[in-house]
Image: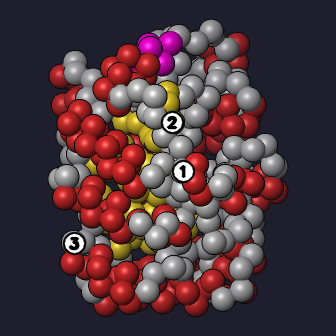
């Protein structure tokens, strides 16, 4: 599962300017327009939710329009539209166009399998900031082993070509797991052959509904860090981050990232949450405004403190392990209990960086 709020950090100098401004601005937002999906991927964090509750309970087009009006007025610039599979909604292009005409810089996450020439033509008339398609394997056998749907591999490749033929900004990505790890380099090479950006995620998480399927596909911590070892840019970024923050005194805030500070997420039923990973605390936008949800509810969430956790309080590797309340809640049903998987990754990253452990 991607954490889209981190994309705000990719804007040169922006995070530092925000941090030093002392202002709490909802610059980056995301919306799942549906949980429904036409694939049945073994690792999906939605679990049984991907079948969706009755369609009638999802936010209507008009409700989404009203929310988009409110978030742009509040200062949102970057906005992610995702799912489930967003193109499963017949009105998705109307939602996208409304967001784009509001001046939002829109990214779309999709599996690409539902794209048609007509949909691609309409996207080309008003291109998004970026479309990201996940490619689960370099071969039909591996891809469809992951997705569980015959014919999905060809439809994904067709979707990729439809966007490229029209010059629509595209990035490819993959989720690295046990079933496809042998094709990671081939997927990366495919992206390079298409001349598009590429990224990957090997941090499989628990599901929202408690199924343990993703854990059977999770790489071992050593495998995750071995993948990272060849990524020079990532190694440099981790080293710089560790050097900058390792000796910083940890505060007692529950959320130490940008969630609910400069970013937020909204689910298909109108629940405003700190981020796409952290859904334990929700504000219902169907019964209140975004302004109230942001300025009062999420502000209170943001200022929560966490009790000291024994195995974390004297550890200086938090910047390397990536623990967060959302991951803890998905796996341990607790906002504060660290996930051992990420503890192990933090230690291995430290060894790789020769950072050591206090």
Q: Position of residue 320 (x, y in %)?
A: 53, 36
Q: Which residue is mark 1?
A: 58
In the depicted structure, whether residue 217 falls above or below residue 32: below
- Of 8 and 345, the residue lying toward us: 8
Please give the name of the residue rendered at 54% of the width and 28% of the height, measured from the top-left corner. 282
Foreground mark, 1 or 3, reads 1
State how far apart marks 3 and 2 are (Cα): 28 Å
- The magenta span reads 299-304
Q: Which residue is mark 2?
A: 271
> Is 126 part of what is drawn in magenta?
no
Q: Main secondary structure of the magenta part?
A: helix
Dot 3 alpha-carbon crowd within 10 angstroms: few under 14, some 14 to 19, many 20 or more: few
Please give the name of the residue rendered at 31% of the width and 43% of the height, measured from the top-left corner. 66
Name the mark on residue 34.
Answer: none
> Is 300 part of what is drawn in magenta?
yes
For this view, does 150 lie left or right of residue 353?
Answer: right
Name the mark on residue 126.
Answer: 3
Quadrant of the image containing the C terminus: top right
Q: Earlier in the sequence, mark 1 or mark 3?
A: 1
Quarter of image, res 161? bottom left
Q: Position of residue 283 (x, y in %)?
A: 49, 27
For this view, does 212 lie left or right of residue 355?
Answer: right
Q: Secondary structure at mark 2?
A: strand
Q: Position of residue 136 (x, y in %)?
A: 61, 73
State how far apart marks 1 and 2 are (Cα): 11 Å
């Amino acid at each position: 599962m991607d954490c889209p709020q981190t994309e705000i950090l990719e804007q040169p100098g922006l995070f530092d300017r925000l941090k030093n401004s002392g202002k709490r601005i909802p610059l980056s937002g995301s919306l799942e327009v549906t949980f429904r999906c036409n694939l049945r991927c073994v690792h999906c964090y939605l679990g049984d939710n991907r079948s969706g509750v009755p369609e009638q309970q999802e936010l209507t087009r008009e409700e989404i329009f009203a929310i988009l009006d409110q978030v742009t007025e509040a200062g949102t610039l970057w906005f992610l539209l995702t799912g489930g599979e967003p193109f499963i909604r017949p009105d998705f292009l109307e939602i996208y166009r409304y967001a784009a005409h509001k001046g939002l810089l829109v990214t779309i996450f999709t599996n690409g399998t539902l794209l048609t020439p007509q949909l691609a033509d309409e996207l080309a008339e008003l291109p998004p900031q970026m479309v990201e398609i996940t490619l689960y394997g370099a071969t039909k056998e591996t891809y469809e082993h992951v997705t569980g749907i015959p014919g999905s591999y060809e439809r994904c490749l067709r979707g990729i070509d439809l966007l490229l033929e029209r010059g629509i900004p595209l990035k490819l990505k993959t989720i690295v797991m046990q079933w496809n790890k042998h094709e990671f380099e081939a997927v990366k090479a495919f992206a390079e052959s298409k001349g598009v950006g590429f990224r990957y995620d090997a941090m499989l998480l628990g599901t929202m509904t408690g199924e343990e399927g993703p854990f059977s596909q999770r790489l071992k911590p050593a495998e995750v860090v071995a993948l990272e070892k060849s990524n020079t840019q990532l190694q440099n970024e981790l080293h710089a981050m560790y050097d900058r923050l390792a000796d910083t005194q940890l505060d007692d805030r529950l959320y130490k990232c940008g969630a609910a500070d400069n970013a937020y997420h909204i689910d298909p039923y109108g629940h405003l949450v700190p981020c796409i990973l952290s859904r334990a605390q929700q504000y219902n936008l169907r019964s209140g405004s975004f302004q109230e949800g942001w300025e009062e509810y999420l502000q209170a969430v943001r200022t929560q403190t966490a009790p000291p956790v024994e195995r974390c309080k004297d550890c200086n590797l938090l910047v390397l392990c990536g623990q967060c309340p959302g991951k803890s809640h998905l796996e341990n049903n607790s906002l504060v209990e660290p996930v051992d998987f990420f503890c192990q990754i933090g230690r291995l990253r430290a060894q790789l960086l020769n950072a050591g452990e206090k």
